[in-house]
Amino acid sequence: MILCCGEALIDMLPRETTLGEKGFSPYAGGAVFNTGIALGRLGVASGFFTGLSDDMMGDILRDTLRASHVDFSYCATLSRPTTIAFVKLVDGHATYAFYDENTAGRMITEADLPALGEDCEALHFGAISLIPEPCGSTYEALLNREHKTRVISLDPNIRPGFIKDKAAHMARIRGMAALSDIVKFSDEDLAWFGLDGDEDTLARHWLHHGAKLVVVTRGADGAVGYTADHKVEVPSEKVTVVDTVGAGDTFDAGVLASLKMQNLLTKQQVTKLTQEQIAKALALGSKAAAVTVSRAGANPPFAHEIGL
């Protein structure tokens, strides 16, 4: 199982009502949630950990996980509200207004951390769940507890508008990345850290500090994977883009799913990936993400839609 650990929320997406008025409709979302959904749809054993509310919005999240074959038995249940994000789309790109105070996802603590079974071979972290407290420290503690025996994947998915203490968040990401096997950045994420150098130099920086595979996504210009021995570039799939919601999250799932399908998702194997193995992983990430951007919202493909 690949256990995705992070935010689950309700995206209120703009929709026109039957009366022609502007309105919003609720859709399950959250970056790490989307990755878990995408993994389940790709046919990989997928699990999810967060704090889920016992309210009606929490039920929407559970129903969505269940429909995509994602195991949510590790989730903590809290009698707190669900995080809500109102979404504004401009030319297919999303901006958000979050309502997150005192929510089930935000308020989980180390006391809520589950004991993981032997079938849990990898953990995936990232995005806005690493910013607020106490959940940010909770996920960091889980990574610190498990990194020696399970593959760790991290997508910082930097959202500057939510980061009130840049130095503190930067320190957290640096610490977590140093203990992670796979770290994925967008080109914008790389720039946020303010380091000098071109993409190659910056990727090598993160490899030097602990990562075994660093992936950089370049939007329409494809993606590149770096290890100590290899640099592998793959093009993006050419599609008509409806919006980019969930694209990076789906890409993460494609990479992890491919590594799992290639029997490479172990602490030993991830240190010695070949060029061909990396290329396969990036290609599946790109292929899956292309489907997501070709339709509205975070709606990752099922395996049969991409020929698996």
Image (cartoon, grey):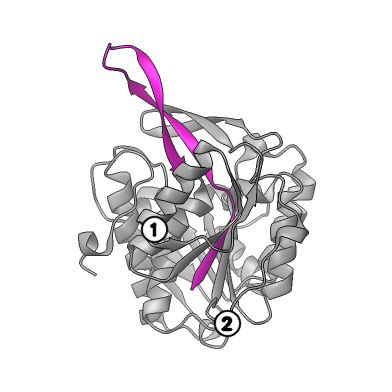
190 lies left or right of 275 = right
Q: Residues within 10 Å of mark 2 (few under 14, many from 20)?
A: few
69 lies left or right of 208 = left
- Dot 2: what SS? loop
Q: Amino acid at mark 1?
A: Ala
Q: Dot 2 corresponds to which residue? A: 118
Q: Position of residue 296 (x, y in %)?
A: 31, 38
Q: Which mark is residue 258?
A: none
Q: Is residue 8 magenta?
A: yes
91 lies left or right of 99 = left
Q: Amino acid at mark 2?
A: Glu
Range covered by the magenta-colored residues: 1-29
Q: CA distance from mark 2 to mark 1?
A: 22 Å
Q: Residue at x 46, y 57 (%)?
A: 35
Q: Residues within 10 Å of mark 1 (few under 14, many from 20)?
A: many
Q: Considering only vertical position in the picture, is 162 above or below 77?
A: above
Q: Dot 1 corresponds to which residue? A: 38
Is residue 297 in view? yes
Q: Position of residue 248 (x, y in %)?
A: 44, 52
